[in-house]
């Protein structure tokens, strides 16, 4: 559908339309609360986001390489690939930091973990709406217990921690740092370009 529109309509208006659709989707996701139903605001936002992203990505690619002669075609393609690689990585890093900061602030003031996390992501997705016009896709990652010192209680050994979490995490173990890094790299790669405004759970089925 997007490729057909690009052939029949000028790419610049299509790029603007795609960004506007994605921004509406992000605005919808940015309104989530702890009591939001998936079939309501969340689903509407998640349907609009990929539609806008697909349209924007297809049209913006044409705009980026349009007018480049043969001698500069390789340079134009390289710049486009660089933007595709760096944009999601920078956006992901910034939004995860924003969501975590907001959630930690609310936790420190006595909010329930679920409420704090939801508010943090709501802030992040609202910020994503502001950056979509710059072609930056925003996602987040929510890891479960990871094999780092932060997953141990004071005085607890790795064996103690593993025994404690074996009955809590359905997969029966903590994640490795390599597994979390692989998920982050995927979100920052072109392979995830259709994924926008998403919270990727890497937690061994630990979410109720």
Image (tube, rainbow, N blue to C red):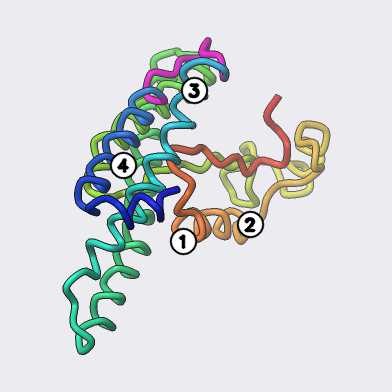
Question: In this image, 191 relative to 207: left or right?
Answer: left
Label 3, label 2: how many angstroms apart (C-alpha)?
Answer: 28 Å
Residue 18 - label: 4
| Label 4: element kind | helix
Answer above or below: position of 195 versus 24.
Answer: below
**Along the polypeptide, which appears first: circle 3 or circle 1?**
3
Task: Tell me, yes or no, whether the two marked residues, 3 and 1, touch with CB atoms within 8 Å.
Answer: no
| Label 2: element kind | helix
Label 1, label 2: how many angstroms apart (C-alpha)?
Answer: 15 Å
Residue drawn at point x = 43 percent, y = 39 percent: 51
**Along the polypeptide, which appears first: circle 1 or circle 2?**
2
Residue 82 appears in which quarter of the rendering? bottom left
Answer above or below: position of 144 versus 148.
Answer: above
Question: Foreground mark, 4 or 1?
Answer: 4
Q: Callout 3: 10 Å neighbours few (<14), some, many (20+)?
A: some
Question: Foreground mark, 1 or 2?
Answer: 1
Instruction: Work out whether residue 128 or residue 41 is closer to the camera in this orientation and state it.
Output: 41
């Amino acid at each position: 559908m997007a490729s057909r529109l690009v052939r029949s309509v000028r790419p610049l208006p299509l790029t603007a339309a795609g960004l506007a659709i994605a921004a509406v989707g992000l605005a919808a996701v940015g309104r989530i609360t702890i009591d939001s139903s998936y079939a309501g605001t969340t689903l509407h936002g998640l349907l609009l986001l990929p539609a806008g992203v697909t349209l924007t990505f297809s049209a913006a690619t044409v705009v980026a390489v349009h007018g480049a002669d043969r001698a500069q075609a390789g340079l134009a393609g390289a710049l486009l690939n660089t933007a595709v690689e760096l944009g999601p990585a920078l956006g992901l890093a910034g939004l995860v930091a924003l969501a975590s900061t907001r959630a930690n602030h609310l936790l420190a003031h006595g909010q329930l973990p679920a409420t704090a996390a939801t508010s943090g992501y709501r802030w992040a997705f609202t910020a994503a709406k502001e950056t979509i016009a710059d072609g930056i896709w925003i996602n987040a990652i929510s890891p479960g217990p990871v094999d780092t010192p932060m997953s141990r209680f004071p005085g607890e050994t790795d064996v103690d921690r593993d025994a404690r979490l074996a009955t809590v995490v359905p997969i029966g173990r903590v994640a490795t740092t390599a597994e979390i890094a692989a998920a982050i790299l995927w979100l920052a790669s072109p392979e995830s370009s259709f994924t926008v405004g998403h919270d990727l759970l890497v937690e061994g089925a630990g979410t109720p």
